Image (spheres, rainbow, N blue to C red):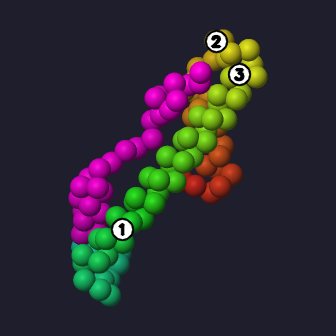
Amino acid sequence: MPLLSGGAISRSVRASAADIQRISERITEALLKQGYVKAKKEKAALSRRVAELITKNLEEEAALEAEAERLAEQHIRRNRGGEGMDERRVIDMIKKKLAEDRGFSL
């Protein structure tokens, strides 16, 4: 039986496709309006690309979270069941270290 509830305590960001689309449209609009980018294609294509990048980032973060939970569970088991350990803090510290080692921005 997993000590960490099989990921039930995960805090990874979860967003629906509609949320991601809405966010990507707003980001695209702001980038264009403020002159940070100039669209070589139609605005919708740029917005789709932003949505792809957001989705990829969220998937990578979810994988990082799962790995951190797995490693935390191993750490807690090695330390006599983790008595007195804050599971979330252990996971967060491992996740931060994994992200840092991989050049991933949280």
Q: In the image as oriented, which residue stretches furthest toward the right? A: 78
**Callout 1–callout 3 Cβ contact below 8 Å:** no
- Kind of residue sitting beneath label 2: Gly
Q: CA distance from mark 2 to mark 3?
A: 13 Å
- Residue 10 or residue 41, whichever sits in front: 10
Q: CA distance from mark 1 to mark 2?
A: 43 Å
Pointer 3 residue:
77
Quick check: can you spot residue 93? no
Find residue 66 and report its horizontal and vertical position in percent: 56, 41
Q: CA distance from mark 1 to mark 3?
A: 41 Å
Q: Secondary structure at mark 3?
A: helix
User: Residue 8 colored magenta?
Assistant: yes
- Residue 7 or residue 12, whichever sits in front: 7
Residue name at image x 45 percent, y 35 percent:
11
Mark 1, residues whose alpha carbon is within 10 Å: few (<14), some, or many (≥20)? some
Residue name at image x 24 percent, y 69 percent:
29
